[in-house]
Amino acid sequence: MIDDVVRRVLDTTVIAHLATLLPDGAPHSVPVWVAAEGEHIAIITGPGYRKTRNMQRDPRVALSMTPIDNPLEPISIRGRVVDWIHGENAWEVVDRIAMSYIGSPYPRTEERMIVLIEPERQTVGM
């Protein structure tokens, strides 16, 4: 279940940082758009990205973000990838997220998919 404070932040245009694990165990961190999708956290990715390959191999992830209106209240989430959404179903979620961030549907220049993350630990504040 997503914490109420975390859900409020996910409903904004916050940029989250997604940490995944490289094959050698080293961390790999990238900024991502995020949104709540039911009781999961949704991020957009594509099939050839390093983060995608990392999550396919090892579903453990961490996310960090700071609310736009309160950058001194960090949010940390640990969880795991529990589902991948492809095709037209993915584009519905991709476009909903894109509308929030850029005010228009996501360009159809490359294949996109949605990763659903189940939060296992959520920390708000220091």
Image (cartoon, rainbow, N blue to C red):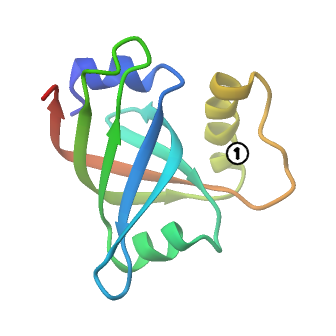
Q: Quadrant where the N terminus lies?
A: top left
In x, y percent, where is residue 55?
41, 69
* Three-letter code, disc 1: Trp
Residue at (41%, 26%) from the top-left corner?
10
- Residue extending furthest toward the top: 69
In x, y percent, where is residue 95?
70, 35
Q: Is residue 56 above or below residue 2?
A: below
Q: Secondary structure at mark 1?
A: helix
Residue at (16%, 25%) from the top-left corner?
125
Q: To which residue does mark 1 refer?
A: 91
In x, y percent, where is residue 117?
35, 50
Q: Is residue 39 above or below residue 6?
A: below
Q: Is residue 71 above or below residue 95?
A: above
Q: Quadrant where the C terminus lies?
A: top left
- Horizontal side of residue 111 vs 38, given as left or right: right
Location of residue 109 (image quadrant): bottom right
Badge 1: how crowded within 10 Å, few (<14), some, or many (20+)?
Answer: many
In x, y percent, where is residue 108?
85, 50
Residue at (17%, 37%) from the top-left corner?
122
